[in-house]
Image (spheres, grey):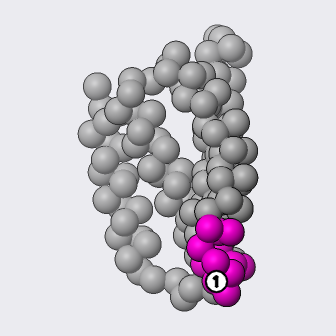
């Protein structure tokens, strides 16, 4: 029988990390669309304000995740989630065209996931 605490721990890690990555992606890139005509320092302050929420989700996510996964596994999971969040952001929010390079990058990450989680 599955222990619910051991099941929800990893799920909460992934959920919190996904939320963190949504904020991270907006903090890092949304200013390129929304604040491009403003001075760079305004973009910095806006990004810092968004990044505060990123860290509010990322720190507990990694603390939870570290109870179940190694440091390398935490990092590669974060990279997979980052790409999964970034691609829709780039296409739907930034109006970038879809590139097959996103698929190739995802396949490379799947290889990295395999190597980090195989043992």
Q: Is residue 46 above or below residue 30?
A: above
Residue under the point 64% across and 27% down = 60
Category of crowding for the residue at label 1, using alpha-carbon neighbours closer than 10 angstroms: few (below 14), some (14–19), many (at least 20): few
Q: Residue 103 versus residue 38: which sits nearer the camera?
A: 38
Q: Which stretch appears magenta?
A: 31-43
Q: Is residue 81 above or below residue 27?
A: above
Q: Residue 88 versus residue 107: which sits nearer the camera?
A: 88
Q: Quadrant of residue 46?
A: bottom right
Q: Is residue 96 above or below residue 43?
A: below
Q: Is residue 110 above or below residue 115?
A: below
Q: Residue 20 versus residue 14: which sits nearer the camera?
A: 20
Residue under the point 40% across and 33% down = 73
Regarding residue 94, the answer to whether it shows in the image is: no
**In which quadrant is the C terminus drawn?**
top left
Q: Residue 116 versus residue 40: which sits nearer the camera?
A: 40
Q: Quadrant of residue 13?
A: top right
Mark 1 residue element: loop
Give coordinates of residue 27: x percent, y percent. Answer: 63, 60
Give coordinates of residue 26: x percent, y percent. Answer: 66, 63
Residue under the point 64% across and 22% down = 9
Check if residue 41 falls in the magenta segment. Answer: yes
- State the count of labels: 1
Give coordinates of residue 57: x percent, y percent. Answer: 68, 37
Regarding residue 1, the answer to whether it shows in the image is: yes
Check if residue 34 falls in the magenta segment. Answer: yes
**In which quadrant is the N terminus drawn?**
top right
Q: Quadrant of residue 7?
A: top right
Residue under the point 37% across and 52% down = 110
Main SS, magenta region, reads helix
Q: Which residue carries the number 1 mark?
A: 36
């Amino acid at each position: 029988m599955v222990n619910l605490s051991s099941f929800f721990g990893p799920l909460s890690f992934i959920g919190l990390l996904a939320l963190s990555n949504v904020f991270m992606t907006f903090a890092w890139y949304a200013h390129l669309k929304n604040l491009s005509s403003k001075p760079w320092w305004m973009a910095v302050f806006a990004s810092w304000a968004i990044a505060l929420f990123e860290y509010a989700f990322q720190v507990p996510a990694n603390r939870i995740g570290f109870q179940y996964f190694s440091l390398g596994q935490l990092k590669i999971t974060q990279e997979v989630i980052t790409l999964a969040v970034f691609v829709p952001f780039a296409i739907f929010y930034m109006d970038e065209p879809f590139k097959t390079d996103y698929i190739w990058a995802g396949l490379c990450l799947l290889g990295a996931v395999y190597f980090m989680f195989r043992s």
